[in-house]
Amino acid sequence: MEKLTNISFVKDLLSAAGFTFSKQMGQNFLINPSVCPRMAQECGCDGIGVIEIGPGIGVLTVELAKRAKKVVSIELDTRLKPVLDVTLKNYDNVTVIYGDVLKLDLMQIINEHFADMEVCVCANLPYYITSPIIMSLLESKLPFKAITVMVQKEAAVRLAAEVGTRQCGAVTAAVSYYAQAKRLFNVERGSFLPAPNVDSSVIRLDVRSKPPVDISDEKAFFKVIKASFGQRRKTLSNSLSSGLGLNKDKVNLCILKAGLKATARAEELTLKDFASLTDILFKEE
Ligand code: SAM
């Protein structure tokens, strides 16, 4: 099926199935022919297993199927079933599962479909749930080799920023605890049907085999990160005392004990700084 990026072919295919785009489900389908082969190439799925989230009409799925040993695609919208039955019919290494990726048991899917192989994730994500999907994939600690996703350009900048720089947010720090992020390439809004009003970027998260810092209490560590970035224009001290409901003098003392300046801001901290600060804050309680 080589015509999945041909606008009139796609329109005919969708209208024959009585399909109308749902903005709510983040349905913007890729029609730029160079994007999917490049994504499939750069996600590292050659000869291994790949989970795709949201196949749409299968334009990326077929590129993954040409390279990977096995593809499992998870699609929320069952209205796409008659379309995918046609577009994927020649690929016997593809299984489509209809359901919400945030509700399915991915461990079970991996055991069932990828028992004897490495697995990666590759997806053009629905914009409305980009961060929840990425965080739930990372927090699941499932054995993904890499997670390659297309997201809104602004989200990509934040997700792949260096911790300790101005673009860093809570999500940057959380992502870099689990993975090394790399921006691969940009995709203009005109590459989609219908065109969204933002540009996109593809990023790859190479999942770490071991976190880059030792953490004694992960839950507390993420709580501190979230509170630190809670009020971006405030100093670390103000954000932490209001976010964690702690006495400001105590917070100031902990900041100094962690070797940080009293006027520090969250975006100046490294993961190691967040780790020491967490230990000190929670030991002092
Ligand atoms: N991969 C296709 C492409 O690149 O043209 C479609 C990408 S479109 C941006 C996002 C897809 O994710 C849609 O097919 C949508 O129905 C699906 N989707 C939305 N929410 C989902 C969810 N919670 N779980 C699984 N799929 C979802």
Image (spheres, grey):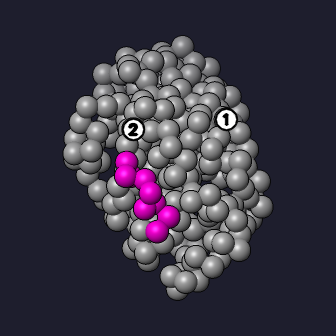
Crowding at label 2, few (<14), some or many (≥20) Cα neighbours within 10 Å? Answer: some
Which residue is at a point 38% across and 19% down the rendered structure image? 210
How many numbered circles does the render carry?
Answer: 2
Q: CA distance from mark 2 to mark 1?
A: 23 Å
| Residue 99 % position (x, y) | 34, 64
Which residue is at a point 52% across and 52% down the rendered structure image? 62
| Residue 126 % position (x, y) | 54, 60
Q: Does residue 67 appear to the left or right of 108 in the view shown?
A: right
Specify start and end residues of the magenta stretch as a single range. Answer: 86-94
The kind of residue tagged 1 is Leu
Quarter occupied by the C terminus: top left
- Determine whether 33 is above or below 110 in the image: below
Q: Which residue is under mark 2?
A: 69
**Which residue occupies the foreground of this view, 253 or 53?**
53
**Which residue occupies the foreground of this view, 155 or 87?**
87
| Residue 82 % position (x, y) | 43, 75
> Assess mark 1: CB under 8 A from ligand 1?
no
Q: Which residue is under mark 1?
A: 184
Quarter occupied by the N terminus: bottom right
Residue 90 falls inside the magenta stretch: yes
